[in-house]
């Protein structure tokens, strides 16, 4: 299989990560598109035989950092996140939204580590290589991300969920 | 006595990254430390919720604009395979991205060919998951199958040989089409992935079209018209590039220069 074909095969995973990283669908797909375009022009820099997924996610990370730096819009750190327009109708929609908000409120660098570990199921070593940070930093960011997310989720009284009427 | 349990151990426990013995040691430690156990359990739940929230994105159809980000290569490859191919993307497929999940995206049904593509996609979705009855007549009776379908469609049909691209004939069946009988051939690769070829003989046009691509739900379809014959090749399980590759092989046999 060619690298290009493998890139195509990785698109759904890029989209999943991007959706969790930036929240809304259109912005996430913009990020994926920028990533693919950049990966395509930089493909000669990819060393054959090495982990293409890690390389591609590194590209995405760099593109994302640049985009955030350029706009400062994506990285919502406050409560004013626009409501996410589309989300499958689920009984636990409120819970899902809380989770999405929680993710959005994590510091960007912690969010990236948590998502790569959880969604991509990367080893800590792979995360370190993908993000270009020491493994100790991976561990401390992961630990803090989980801790923060947990206290945010706990902040939501469980009863509130029972009030959801479909 | 094993090493003291660290925060690193606990994180790795959540992620299933511990060797089995260490895992058992951590589990034992957690049993004696209910507060930490509760915390670790909530980490695990968060991970689960994250996955169940975002994993569905994997199943969403990939927008054309993302595939097209790799377009320079695709175009080059196309040119290498066959100079005659013009890849026209159906507008309907683009519009369809707005819809999600299992909802069927409406291909713009403004002409007979795209209606055919749509019917082909439905036929594919209907028959390709069949385990026991995927076809009416199996490939072991290929001559009979082709003769029978040719007779019903009133034209000499051929079941293209797709072994060069990794697919062998499973068999075929007769289907009701828009205006009359339609032939449906099914192929399968050795990994079990199926593609189906839908053949009409009543397009009633004297023109030929280039390849067009449409997508219905998760089924991708390449289709083309050659005079009275209309062909649509569908699959839900392979990439557009791979499907195009199979479509090229079929086209070359069905429409020899």
Image: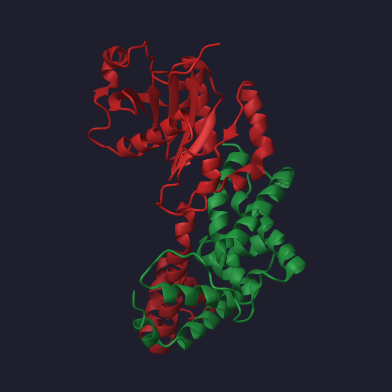
Chain colours: A green, B red
Q: How many marks?
A: 0
Instruction: Decide: is A146 above or below A11.
Output: below
Nearer the observer, B195 or A135: B195
Name the residue located 32 percent from the left edge and 16 percent from the top edge.
B153
Judged left or right of residue A38, residue B156 is left
Look at the image and tell me whether residue B44 can be seen: no
The quarter of the rendered structure image containing the C terminus of chain A is bottom left
Look at the image and tell me whether residue A100 can be seen: yes
- Relative image position of residue B107 (x, y in whole percent): 47, 40
Instruction: Decide: is A37 above or below A5.
Output: below
The image quarter containing residue A19 is bottom right
Name the residue located 44 percent from the left edge and 24 percent from the top edge.
B231
- Relative image position of residue A113 (x, y in whole percent): 59, 69
Instruction: Decide: is A13 above or below A114.
Output: above
Nearer the observer, B175 or B129: B175
The image quarter containing residue B51 is bottom left
The quarter of the rendered structure image containing the N terminus of chain A is top right
- Relative image position of residue A22 (x, y in whole percent): 61, 66
Judged left or right of residue B124, residue B96 is right
Nearer the observer, A10 or B25: A10
- Relative image position of residue B131 (x, y in whole percent): 26, 37
Instruction: Decide: is B187 above or below B27.
Output: above
The single residue placed furthest to the right in the displayed view is A70
Name the residue located 45 percent from the left edge and 52 percent from the top edge.
B59
């Amino acid at each position: 299989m060619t690298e290009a074909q493998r890139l195509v095969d990785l698109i759904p995973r890029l989209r999943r990560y991007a959706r969790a990283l930036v929240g809304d669908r259109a912005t996430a797909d913009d990020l994926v598109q920028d990533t693919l375009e950049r990966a395509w022009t930089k493909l000669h820099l990819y060393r054959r035989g090495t982990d293409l997924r890690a390389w591609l996610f590194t590209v995405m990370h760099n593109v994302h950092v640049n985009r955030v730096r350029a706009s400062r819009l994506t990285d919502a750190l406050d409560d004013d996140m626009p409501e996410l327009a589309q989300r499958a109708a689920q009984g636990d929609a409120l819970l899902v939204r809380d989770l999405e908000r929680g993710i959005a409120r994590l510091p960007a660098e912690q969010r990236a580590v948590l998502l790569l570990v959880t969604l991509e199921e990367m080893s800590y070593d792979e995360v370190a290589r993908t993000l270009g940070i020491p493994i100790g930093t991976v561990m401390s960011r992961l630990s803090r991300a989980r801790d923060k997310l947990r206290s945010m989720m706990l902040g939501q009284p469980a009863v509130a969920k029972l009030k959801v009427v479909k | 006595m094993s090493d003291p349990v660290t925060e690193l151990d606990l994180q790795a426990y959540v992620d299933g990254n511990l060797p089995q013995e260490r895992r058992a040691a951590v589990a034992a430690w957690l049993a004696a430390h209910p507060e930490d156990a509760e915390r670790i359990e909530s980490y695990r739940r968060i991970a689960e919720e994250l996955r169940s929230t975002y994993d569905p994105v994997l199943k969403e159809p990939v927008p054309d604009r993302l595939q097209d980000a790799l377009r320079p290569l695709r175009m080059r490859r196309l040119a290498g395979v066959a100079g005659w191919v013009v890849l026209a993307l159906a507008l309907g497929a683009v519009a369809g991205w707005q819809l999600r999940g299992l909802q069927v995206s409406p291909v713009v049904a403004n002409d007979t060919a795209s209606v055919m593509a749509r019917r082909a996609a439905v036929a594919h979705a209907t028959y390709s998951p069949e385990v026991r009855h995927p076809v009416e007549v199996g490939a072991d009776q290929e001559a009979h199958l082709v003769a029978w379908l040719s007779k019903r469609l009133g034209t000499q049909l051929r079941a293209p040989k797709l072994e060069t691209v990794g697919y062998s004939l499973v068999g075929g069946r007769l289907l009701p089409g828009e205006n009359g009988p339609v032939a449906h051939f099914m192929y399968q690769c050795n990994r079990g992935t199926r593609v189906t070829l839908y053949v009409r003989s009543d397009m009633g046009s004297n023109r030929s079209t280039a390849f067009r691509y449409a997508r219905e739900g998760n089924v991708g379809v390449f289709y083309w018209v050659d005079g009275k014959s209309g062909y649509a090749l569908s699959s839900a399980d392979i990439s557009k590039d791979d499907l195009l590759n199979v479509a090229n092989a079929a086209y070359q046999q069905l429409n020899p220069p």
